Amino acid sequence: DNFFAALSLIKVEGRSFFDYVPYKTIGVDATPLWELRYNELTDSGTKSGLVILCKDDRNDDNEIPFGSKFTQIYRYYDETFGDYREQYTPIRSLWLNTNSNAELFDGVDKEAEFIKENWSKYSKMVRVNQSQKTMQLGSAKGFLNTAIDWSLLNAAENLNPKLLAHEGFAERLAVMPIFQVDFVNSSKKDFNNKVNAVILDFNNKLCAA
């Protein structure tokens, strides 16, 4: 709370970060994160909007975080990590630790299907499509793939357009609306412009639904 109180004092042209949270985040008539829409956050695209998320272990409704500006996240008990890591978590994000395009595409598809099959559990979560290649040297195939890509930037520039072209991208975005890749600003094959157009179209369709 002390950190955010200090942050609220930093202003540009009379506005702080907290002036860009235009919706009620907590209490009666608050907008749950999973119901928040692009047009509500941006006043139909005419203003900048901000969603503030932070780690907070307080669950008591009487313990309202600083300024009531933090969006409450529905948390669920996730047993998929096994007994050694039993926990309640607000985020579903599977890290696909591979430098193989085929394995990554297969993993992303399976993750989307798993979430859809368990929709009642995950529908209110922050669901992340984490599609990033890793560098691996443990096998001949891994060494070859790493040698071909030779850098994370090069790997991202080659992979990112393929993710967008992979069949069913829009359907996966509906299941995992947080699209996380390395070097999202990479412009090879106009990736950054194309992916932002798809994401904007997805948000506009949510507004009209």
Image: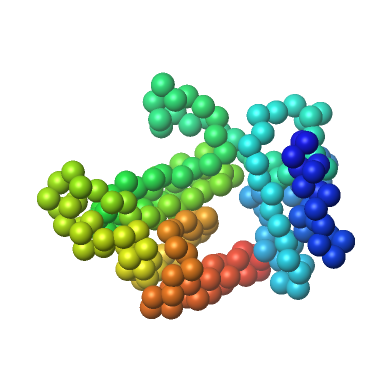
Quadrant that contains the N terminus: top right
**How many marks do you count on the picture?**
0
Left of 193 or right of it: where is 53?
Answer: right
Give how far across and how far down residue 12 sits, in percent. Answer: 81, 62
Counting from the top left corner in percent of width and height, residue 171 is at 45, 62
The structure residue drawn at horizontal position 26% and vertical position 61%, both measured from the top left corner, is 150
Q: Residue at x 32, y 46 (%)?
A: 97
User: What's the colour scheme?
Assistant: rainbow
Outermost left residue? 140
Residue 49 lies, in percent from the top left, at 73, 61
Q: Is residue 65 visible?
A: no
- State the image coordinates of residue 80 (x, y, percent, origin top left): 41, 32
Residue drawn at x 38%, y 78% is: 189
Residue 5 lies in what quarter of the image?
A: top right
- Decide if residue 13 is on the left or right side of residue 95: right
Residue 128 visible, this orientation: yes
Q: Is residue 124 above or below residue 193?
A: above
- Residue 84 or 148: which is nearer the viewer? 148
Compared to residue 84, the image places residue 151 above or below, namely: below
**Along the line of sight, the residue nearer the viewer: 154 or 181:** 154
Residue at the spot 19% in from the left edge and 51% down from the top edge? 142
| Residue lying at the far top of the rendered structure | 83
* Picture quadrant of residue 74: top right
What residue occupies the far right of the structure in this picture? 14
In which quadrant will I find the C terminus? bottom right
